[in-house]
């Protein structure tokens, strides 16, 4: 995902302290900034990120959180403050693998690989 200045934002599934990172890369200067290193707030971010209208980044981690089943997060790239929005429990899904998308009303949508009623995954909606 690119911002208006041409910086690239993405995730690395490992690195930092081994749980993954969110980064910003300036493709002209090749300067890489780590915006967040996951610890107990999530692990293994494998999908892409999306921006909201205010410039905040949203993403998922496949693992981590209280039950180790993944999280949804919001990250302010300027302040580097990460806000957990949802921690999966299994009943509501687990291992979110695809990238988030914004719906027309501002809600976020995504899928999980497993969990839910039959442990076959879920489609979820999250209103930030």
Image (spheres, grey):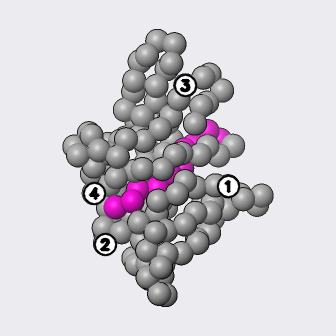
Does 99 sit left or right of 93 as displayed? Answer: right
- How far is mark 3 from mark 1, CA to CA? 21 Å
Q: Judging from the image, what secondary structure is the residue with disc 1 in?
A: strand
Tell me the quadrant of the picture where the N terminus can be found.
top right
Mark 2 highlights which residue? Answer: 67
Of labels 3 and 4, the one closer to you: 3
Determine if the magenta segment contains residue 61. yes
Q: Which residues are magenta?
A: 54-63
Which picture quadrant has residue 5? top right
Using the image, tell me which numbered label, if any, was put on residue 40. 4
- The answer to whether the residue labelled 3 contacts the one labelled 4, judged by CB atoms less than 8 Å apart, is no
Where is residue 121 shown, x and y percent of the image? Answer: 49, 75
- How far is mark 2 from mark 3, CA to CA? 34 Å
Sequence order check, earlier mark of 2 and 3:
3
Mark 1 highlights which residue? Answer: 102
Does 116 sit left or right of 38 as displayed? Answer: right
Which picture quadrant has residue 63? bottom left
Task: Tell me if residue 82 comes above or below residue 105 in the rendering.
Answer: above
Work out whether residue 69 or residue 58 is closer to the camera in this orientation and state it.
69
């Amino acid at each position: 995902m690119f911002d208006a200045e041409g910086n690239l934002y993405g995730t690395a599934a490992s690195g930092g302290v081994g749980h993954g990172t969110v980064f910003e890369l300036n493709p002209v200067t090749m300067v890489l900034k780590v915006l967040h290193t996951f610890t107990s707030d999530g692990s293994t971010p494998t999908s892409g990120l999306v921006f909201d209208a205010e410039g905040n980044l949203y993403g998922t981690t496949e693992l981590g959180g209280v039950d180790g089943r993944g999280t949804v997060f919001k990250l302010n790239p300027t302040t580097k403050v990460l806000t957990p929005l949802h921690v999966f429990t299994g009943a509501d899904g687990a291992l979110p693998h695809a990238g988030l998308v914004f719906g027309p009303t501002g809600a976020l949508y995504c899928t999980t690989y497993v969990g839910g009623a039959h442990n076959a995954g879920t489609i979820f909606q999250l209103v930030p």
